[in-house]
Image (spheres, rainbow, N blue to C red):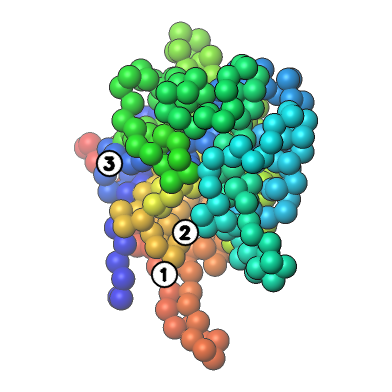
Amino acid sequence: MESIHRGHVVQVDATGAVLRTAGDPDVVVALRSTVKPFTLVALLEAGGVREFDLSPAELAVMASSHSGEDLHVRTLQAVFRRAGVSQTLLACGSEGAPMDELTSVRLTRDGEKPGPIRHQCSGMHAAQLLLARIADWTLEDYWQPDHPVQVATRAVVARVFATAPADLITATDQCGVDTYAFPLRSVAGAFALLADPDVLPAADARRSLSGCLRVIRDAMLANPELVGGTRDRLDTSLMKALPGRLIAKGGAEALRGIAVLADRATSTSASAFAIKVEDGGGFDRAPWSIAIEALRLAGVLGGQPLRALGRYHRPIQLDPRGKIAAETVAEFDLVPVRELVR
């Protein structure tokens, strides 16, 4: 073995109760881009879908970390035109954009410098600009921590995680807005809520989020290529391997949440996973392999869908002659909690 990556995996049921775990389910992680489906709730609650006639595809790209391909850019540009908002107001920067290699090569060939709209976080930033527009707040400084947009975003995140805004642990994300820290099991719990927004009892304050989360969930399910991209994006590939069953949303530094919807055909209840690789998972090998292996061990993936995801399950490196030089293999046990407490 040349490299070893340590990580943590937790699976919870629809209510957030831990089902299986490997490593420490209470390790504290920064949400980074895994938070995007939940921050979008603020725009929906403000009436953004009706005000701007937002389609499911447009909602999906606002919940995404997209690859910066033309389909992502065109989708967002249509929203900006209808809203009367300039894309030049995007404050996410353009570092690392576009993520899609073929698009990057084409832009370089054509002498085109990618702008912020090709940044993977431009969808979330677009949603925040629309929130400022609908509430008649200033647009130029929407990203500032004390701006009403960010105050509203913190309030929504706090509701999703059943805490108070003042108790949130925050840091600045690479796209220039706040990110938030929670135990890994809480991240899984949020994605379980996305998998089944109606599972909570009426007395639970989070139940008020159900309608918006259902709209966001269904938009992402219907548009997997807008959640990630058309090439080499695990989140998109997972969602296409089991259509209508999975929502996967990765974040920087090798964090990923995966919502697993209930399946009546197999009498499988809704659940969710949260996965974190300690070293940030350079080159994507470890995060890809661990995510697929966790789903396999839990019985979510098997057969043809698992085979279709083989290049993520055991990523390989080739030598100059096309022969396999190295392979990434995930080795861990996803232990049912009931076995740990006997």
Q: Name the residue carrying label 1.
A: 328
Kind of residue at badge 1: Thr
Kind of residue at badge 3: Val
| The N terminus: image quadrant | bottom left
Residue 299 point in image, percent of width and height: 49, 49
- Rendered position, 240 above or below 245: below
Q: Residue at x 73, y 20 (%)?
A: 51
Kindly indicate the quadrant of the structure image that contains residue 114.
Answer: bottom right
Q: CA distance from mark 3 to mark 1?
A: 24 Å
Question: Which residue is nearer to you in this view: 72 or 192?
Answer: 72
- Rendered position, 197 above or below 118: above
User: For the residue carrying disc 3, how many other residues have a C-alpha within 10 Å: few (<14), some (14-19), or many (20+)?
Assistant: some
Q: Is residue 259 visible?
A: yes
Residue 178 point in image, percent of width and height: 41, 34
Q: Name the residue carrying label 2.
A: 288
Q: Earlier in the sequence, mark 3 or mark 1?
A: 3
Q: Name the residue carrying label 3.
A: 27
Q: Is residue 267 visible?
A: no
Q: Earlier in the sequence, mark 2 or mark 1?
A: 2
Q: Residue at x 70, y 48 (%)?
A: 73
Kind of residue at badge 2: Trp
User: Farthest top residue?
Assistant: 203
Question: Which residue is nearer to you in this view: 286 or 86?
Answer: 86
Residue 124 shown left or right of residue 255 in the figure:
right
The answer to the question of whether label 2 and label 1 lie on touching residues, with beta carbons closer than 8 A, is yes
Q: Secondary structure at mark 3?
A: loop
